[in-house]
Image (tube, grey):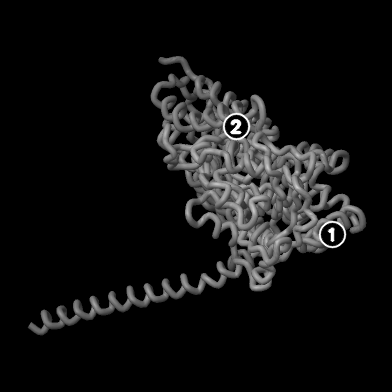
């Protein structure tokens, strides 16, 4: 009788000990996992990198048909003063012809002649040609990425090649008619 | 596994130490006189030790370079030029490190091809093979980050293209890329962490090399006949026989290596990397180092989406598919011991596999050429065909060969390689 009681007592005890072991190991595991986070997150952009996130640009000197490149957050930004023909071409494209469907109107923030884009190809991040006069502008008169052959139109939309998306439009606003703030 | 011999040094102090840490016995049993090794290893078996030696060359030259290099976007390029021009013997050590990477890959590629030809990956050496692949992957990561450090145009744009591969991952891709960069483009934080990791990874490789050699010790060396050792008559001690043979190989290999260092130190580099990095100008074409070209060709060969034809529904966009194909081409090799179902190891006794092996080598050469060309004209088509063949070789031909190939009779033993007529 006493032996049986003893065994039962032991089994109960064993169950409790197992629970304590599993719970303690579990908590230690969770703690160790959480402790790893600072060592991962330190790789994300630091506060000073984030602080460099806005820039103002005077666009009054860009003539019609010309474009400039400025640097924002380490990336090139294309600012293009489009001609009437280029605008008409961008607006005239049927949505069904596009890979990443966006109207030209969704891609400009002020007058239709100003187009502001992040100048990195959405394929693997090269800078497409087409901003400087004399550059290869690709088959659609916008930009051409020489790395893997993506063609963008006069609205910066992907038309042909391996890139999956249109050139991104950064967050920006017109401060005055000739001054824009990016970021 | 061979018996483990302990050695008792005559020197008293050495004996005292050996009793407490038997390190001499370890060497004796792994690469010494106490290491019975198949007697028929040919010169293709030299490239393992050559690869190990190149790792040592890279670590020593790299540590010295790190004493003079500055990982800062404003100073990195000039500090590397200064090493070449002003630092004592910098003209020797920098090309030694840069060409050393290439020669490390040459040794490793030949070592891998030897494994493929002689079936070194088959049971019981699967883990040995997979540890080798882990070393190969670590080498690729290390070499890629090392190439970024001089901060030339190819450094910068190579880093941009390769880190952007991760943006193809659905949902979290862009966050991962930002995490890798430590900013919104490849910039100073990226350069700093690449330097740190480039310093770390060779020592991780060294650790895996030790496991690789340990696994070799457990399963014993393979041999050109691909049959197991039957008796002591099949074996000779590693030292002095193979240490001498390896040393001769080192002489030949280093002669070629030295020719590059002294007479054409930049032959394998890209001229654009002598232009300091400029984040606003992409070079005319971005080309990785030669040892990455076949995999770069596989990446670029995929230019089509997978989806429902005739609709806009896309399951896997081309960019992601290319990235998957590139990583799969290497990860696939981990499954090779099970994809190749033939019981016979060595290609000497596999007439069909022998042909396919050389076709495979030719396809890898083709992909290397394609990877270095601009994606225009015939090259993308050849790239796609080469990629298709690469996967077909491992996923279709090898499993089928195991079933249908008529192999030649295997010799009785290594010491008695002539097949006796049936009695």
Q: Is residue A157 left or right of residue B287?
A: left
Q: Which residue is mark 2?
A: B40
* Residue nearer the viewer, A129 or B219: A129
Choose the circle earlier in sequence order: 2 or 1: 2
Give how far across and how far down residue A166 sits, in percent. Answer: 58, 47
In 3D space, how far apart are the residues under numbered discs 2 and 1 (Cα atoms)? 49 Å
Q: Quadrant of residue A2?
A: bottom left
Q: Residue at x 84, y 38 (%)?
A: B259
Q: Is residue B17 left or right of residue B324?
A: right
Numbered tag placed on residue B79 in the rendering: 1
Give how far across and how far down residue A109 sits, in percent. Answer: 61, 57
Q: Is residue B265 left or right of residue A181?
A: right
Q: Is residue A87 left or right of residue B330?
A: right
Does the rendering let one see residue B340? yes
* SS of the residue under disc 2: loop
Task: Name the quarter where the C terminus of chain B is drawn.
Answer: top left
* Residue nearer the viewer, B206 or B293: B293
10 Å neighbourhood of mark 1: few (<14), some, or many (≥20)? some
Q: Residue at x 48, y 51 (%)?
A: B170
Give how far across and how far down residue B161 sits, in percent. Answer: 65, 48
Does the rendering let one see residue B48? no
In the image, farthest residue toward the bottom: A2
In the image, farthest residue toward the left: A1
Q: Residue at x 42, y 36 (%)?
A: B311
B390 to B176, vertically: above or below: above
* SS of the residue under disc 1: helix
Which chain letter goes with mark 2? B
B172 to B323, vertically: above or below: below
Mark whose residue sits in front, 2 or 1: 1
Give how far across and how far down residue B141 sits, in percent. Answer: 63, 51
């Amino acid at each position: 009788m006493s032996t049986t009681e003893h065994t039962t007592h032991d089994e109960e005890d064993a169950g409790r000990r197992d629970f304590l072991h599993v719970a303690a190991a579990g908590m230690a595991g969770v703690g160790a996992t959480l402790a790893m986070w600072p060592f991962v997150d330190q790789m994300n952009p630091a506060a000073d990198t984030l602080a460099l996130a806005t820039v103002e640009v005077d666009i009054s000197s860009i003539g019609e048909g010309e474009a400039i490149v400025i640097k924002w957050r380490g990336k090139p930004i294309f600012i293009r003063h489009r001609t009437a023909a280029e605008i008409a071409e961008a607006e005239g494209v049927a949505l069904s012809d596009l890979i990443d469907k966006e109207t030209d109107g969704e891609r400009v923030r002020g007058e239709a002649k100003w187009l502001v884009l992040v100048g990195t190809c959405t394929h693997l991040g090269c800078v497409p040609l087409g901003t400087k006069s004399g550059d290869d502008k690709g088959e659609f008169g916008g930009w051409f990425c020489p790395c893997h052959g993506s063609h963008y139109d006069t609205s910066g939309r992907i038309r042909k090649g391996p890139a999956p998306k249109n050139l991104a439009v950064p967050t920006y606003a017109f401060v005055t008619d000739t001054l824009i703030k990016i970021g | 596994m061979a018996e483990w011999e302990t050695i008792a040094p005559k020197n008293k102090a050495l004996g005292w130490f050996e009793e407490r840490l038997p390190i001499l016995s370890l060497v004796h049993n792994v690469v010494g006189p106490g290491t019975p090794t198949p007697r028929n290893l040919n010169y293709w078996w030299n490239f393992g030790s050559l690869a190990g030696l190149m790792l040592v060359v890279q670590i020593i030259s790299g540590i010295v370079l790190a004493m003079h290099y500055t990982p800062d976007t404003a100073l990195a390029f000039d500090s590397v030029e200064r090493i070449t021009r002003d630092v004592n013997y910098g003209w020797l050590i920098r090309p030694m490190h840069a060409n050393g990477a290439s020669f490390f890959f040459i040794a490793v590629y030949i070592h891998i091809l030897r494994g493929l030809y002689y079936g070194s990956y088959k049971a019981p050496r699967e883990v040995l093979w997979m540890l080798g692949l882990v070393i190969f992957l670590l080498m690729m990561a290390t070499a890629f980050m090392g190439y970024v450090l001089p901060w030339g145009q190819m450094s910068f744009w190579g880093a941009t293209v390769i880190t952007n591969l991760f943006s193809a991952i659905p949902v979290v891709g862009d966050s991962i890329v930002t995490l890798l960069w430590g900013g919104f483009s490849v910039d100073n934080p990226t350069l700093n962490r690449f330097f740190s990791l480039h310093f770390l990874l060779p020592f991780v490789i060294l650790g895996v090399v030790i496991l690789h050699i340990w696994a070799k010790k457990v399963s014993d060396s393979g041999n050109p006949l691909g049959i197991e050792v039957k008796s002591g008559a099949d074996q000779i001690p590693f030292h002095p026989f193979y240490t001498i043979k390896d040393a001769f190989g080192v002489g030949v290999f280093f002669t070629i290596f030295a020719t590059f260092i002294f007479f054409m130190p930049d032959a394998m580099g890209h001229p654009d990397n002598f232009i300091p990095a400029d984040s606003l100008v992409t070079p005319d074409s971005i080309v990785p180092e030669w040892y990455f070209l076949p995999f770069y060709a596989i990446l670029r060969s995929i230019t089509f989406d997978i989806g429902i034809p005739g609709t806009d529904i896309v399951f896997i966009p081309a960019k992601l598919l290319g990235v998957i194909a590139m990583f799969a081409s290497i990860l696939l090799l981990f499954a090779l011991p099970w994809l190749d179902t033939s019981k016979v190891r060595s290609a000497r006794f596999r007439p069909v596999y022998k042909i396919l092996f050389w076709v495979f080598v030719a396809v890898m050469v083709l992909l290397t050429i394609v990877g270095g060309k601009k994606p225009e004209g015939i090259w993308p088509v050849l790239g796609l065909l080469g990629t298709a063949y690469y996967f077909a070789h491992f996923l279709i031909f090898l499993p089928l060969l195991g079933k249908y190939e008529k192999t030649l009779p295997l010799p009785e033993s290594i010491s008695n390689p002539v097949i006796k007529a049936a009695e």
